[in-house]
Amino acid sequence: MITRADTLARAATLRATFEAAGAVPVETPILQPADTLLDLYGEDIRARAYITSDALRGEQMLRPDFTVPVVEMHMSHGAEPARYTYSGEVFRRQEHDPDRANEYIQVGYEVFDRANPAAADAEVFTLFAQAVAPLNLRAATGDIGVLMAAVRGLRTTDARKAALLRHIWRPRRFRALLERYAGRLPVAAQRARLLEGALSDDAPLIGKRSQAEIDARVALLRADAAEPPLNGAEVDLLDALLNVRETMPYALAQLRDIAVDLPSIAAAVDGLAARAEALAASDVDVDGLPFEASFGRTSMEYYDGFVFGFFSAQRADLPAIATGGRYDALTRRLGNGAEIPAVGGVLRPGLMLELEAQA
Amino acid sequence: MSVKLGVPSKGRLMEKTFDWFRARGVTLTRTGADREYAGAVEGVTGVSLVLLSAAEVPRELAAGRLHFGVTGADLVQEKLPLWEQQLEPLAELGFGHADLVLAVPKAWVDVDTLDDLDAVATAFRAAHGMRLRIATKYHRLVREHLRHAGVADYALVDSQGATEGTVANETAEMIADITSSGETLRANHLKVLDDAPILRSQATLWRSRVADLSDEERGIAAALMSHLGSE
């Protein structure tokens, strides 16, 4: 039986390792203002976080992660470059799987550094790889930035690209949009009449959404209908890209092939290559390191570049023991105009002890 | 000791439930004064009738205080996470049909599907600096449905009654509610999205998987189930 004291002791050891790597230890309140998190994640977060409230401060959330408060803290008064470490409880509401913990200890390491993104990525990955090395975990890596570059490079309207980018993290909706823009879905009769201007409705307008907003959207729909469908070859390239799943050297070779026809990803692929070199320079076995283009698309909403995770091959029922990635855009959203490239990760000492106890 | 059967205490749901049991040889009656929630069971011995609000039946079954109960699938799925582990559906009773649907103002000619809703929700947030509000009492079901569909920029606001009126009152932009005929929606200038409803529900007879049964009660429960044709 692993006690809370065991877990806290391991968390302290891990945090000391991160401090030795140059990080400043930081603390964040357990109660977080709900607004920021709701703005960032949308209503979904209510299913994943515990919310409480009082009459003075309104809705508060039991800290579902450290990244957001640490970024806020850094953006308001951090010096650059900065490295932070922390450990403490996070709380996750569980409604489907009673075996998943709703409260657990996380230890994290975050780097805010403009100088050399590839080196910062490699630094974070290497630290986590070393921390979990005795557990013999399976590593997974990906790069959301390559996907975003591919979407930005499609030869279509900015409105379509913006919609696709918004749904990078929701594969089902992303797919539906892609099919629609590619002209592969039939237009419903009602929608066809609207586009032709043959739809009249005398229902009174109720609610806050104005007639001007409705008219603007109808105009957008008509403009979009007048656009040619996405080029089928480009859609196929995007599919090929989403399906890349290889060890790093082969993945890079495949991505370079795709970049010949989809030149918009070339810079992102160069970034991936630079990261691979930086990883090799820190003694990571890059030749054996898996790369999966779709990794991180379902659960890691604020990551927009490098993503990684460490999983137990023997205990596939366990969530990731460690996860992390680059979140430059998050610093922009929380920075009130300021931004800084940032990368970091968290690991779960409780799960590490559980795996060690079984070994 | 007896086996406890929970039935909605009021209105058409109660009467139709009584009819359904009577057709299977089990007579349920309300006893005592008109406003007293007491009942009797004839046709099978050892069963006692508990009259209560349909909304409380799921919780009572899950707590094991009822052995059997009649209520809508909507209420069970909204109120009980992992409901399959706690309750077993024995029979759909063929009445109390209702769909949980998403409805928007009929004047939103540009919105027919969840696809549209997603786009409109994002534009609404940009225009108004707030997320599009959906009034409902089915928070869990609506949230899961929208998450599954990949719709994110919305906020649920709680509405425990007269939900159809919230849009005209500008306390919400749209609603998610139970409807059987759609008449109330139409009267309030709302239309249902074309996609499949969030849930199709009807009155259902449930068995609690967690309620304790003595040997004697086990016999009574088996007799009741065989009467009702669900052994």
Image (spheres, rainbow, N blue to C red):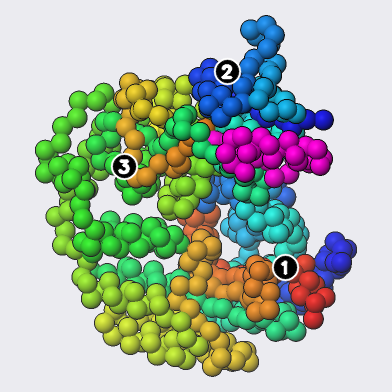
Assign a secondary structure to mark 2.
loop
The three-letter code of the residue at mark 1 reads Arg
Q: Tell me the tag on residue B194.
A: 3
Location of mark 2 (residue): B10
Question: Is residue B229 covered in magenta?
Answer: yes
Query: Is A192 left, or right, of A87 in this rendering?
Result: left
- Image x and y of residue B68, in percent: 66, 35
Question: Is residue B35 covered in magenta?
Answer: no
Residue A171 at least partly seen: yes
Position of residue A294 relative to residue A209, above or below, is below
Location of mark 1 (residue): A348
Estimate the spatial distance between the alpha carbons at disc 2 and disc 3, rounded to whole Å.
33 Å
For the residues bearing labels 3 and 1, Cβ distance under 8 angstroms: no
The three-letter code of the residue at mark 3 reads Asp
- Classify 10 Å Cα crowding around label 3: few (below 14), some (14-19), many (20 and above): few
Query: Is A40 left, or right, of B110 in this rendering?
Result: right
Chain at tag 1: A
The residue at 81%/42% (across/down) is B215
Marks 2, 1 in one chain: no
Assign a secondary structure to mark 1.
loop
